[in-house]
Image: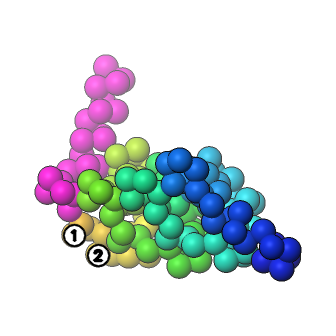
Amino acid sequence: MLKSSGCRVCLEMGNKDGKRPIHEAAHFSQLECLEVLIKAGCDVNALKRADWTPLMLASTRPDEPCVAALLGAGALPLLANKDGWTAAQLAARAGHLAVLERLLAAEPRLLDSRSRTGRTLLHTAGEARLGERAARS
């Protein structure tokens, strides 16, 4: 329906940061909106400024269903932002285990990914864990 009504262009328009509606839906864990945008054919691998995809934004939240919807629609988990961070590294940094497990099940090669500074997924997860401990102390 959205495609036939001429709304397709609106669905792919970005704001000044290059964020499209699909980025916003993923970032704010709006699964129903995300599903409508995916069904309308929005680009699940669209890049906003700083090279963040909807999957990366969803991975910063403890929202495994949004991540699963994006992966099911063809989102590429190995894409990295300008700093070399993948969705898995962002999920690990935020401490979202269910999201991280979903990403690794979809793409096991994420274990070998490195940021531009050489940080591995294990470095990121370990640092996040140490940060949790410090916050509780």
Write down the quadrant of residue 95 in the picture. top left
Which residue position holds label 2? 109
Q: Tag 2, which secondary structure?
A: helix
Residue pictured at 50% horizontal, 48% vertical = 17
How many other residues sit within 10 Å of disc 1, few (<14), some (14-19) or many (≥20)? few
Is-magenta flag for residue 37? no
Q: Is residue 125 left or right of residue 25?
A: left
Q: Tag 1, which secondary structure?
A: helix
Q: How many marks?
A: 2
> Which of these two is toward me, 125 or 28?
28
- Hey, which residue is sitting farthest top in the picture? 137
Q: Main secondary structure of the magenta part?
A: helix
Write down the quadrant of residue 106 in the picture. bottom left
Residue 65 image position (x, y, % from top left) = 61, 61
Q: Which residues are magenta?
A: 114-137
Residue pictured at 83% horizontal, 79% vertical = 4
User: Label 1 is placed on what type of residue?
Assistant: Asp
Q: Is residue 92 left or right of residue 33?
A: left
Residue pictured at 73% horizontal, 59% vertical = 33
Which residue position holds label 1? 112
Is residue 68 in view from this perspective?
yes
* The C terminus sits in image quarter: top left
Residue 110 image position (x, y, % from top left) = 30, 69
Is residue 99 in view from this perspective?
no
User: Label 2 is placed on what type of residue?
Assistant: Arg
> Which of these two is toward me, 23 or 30?
23
Q: Is residue 109 left or right of residue 46?
A: left
Q: Are marks 1 and 2 in contact (CB under 8 Å)?
A: yes
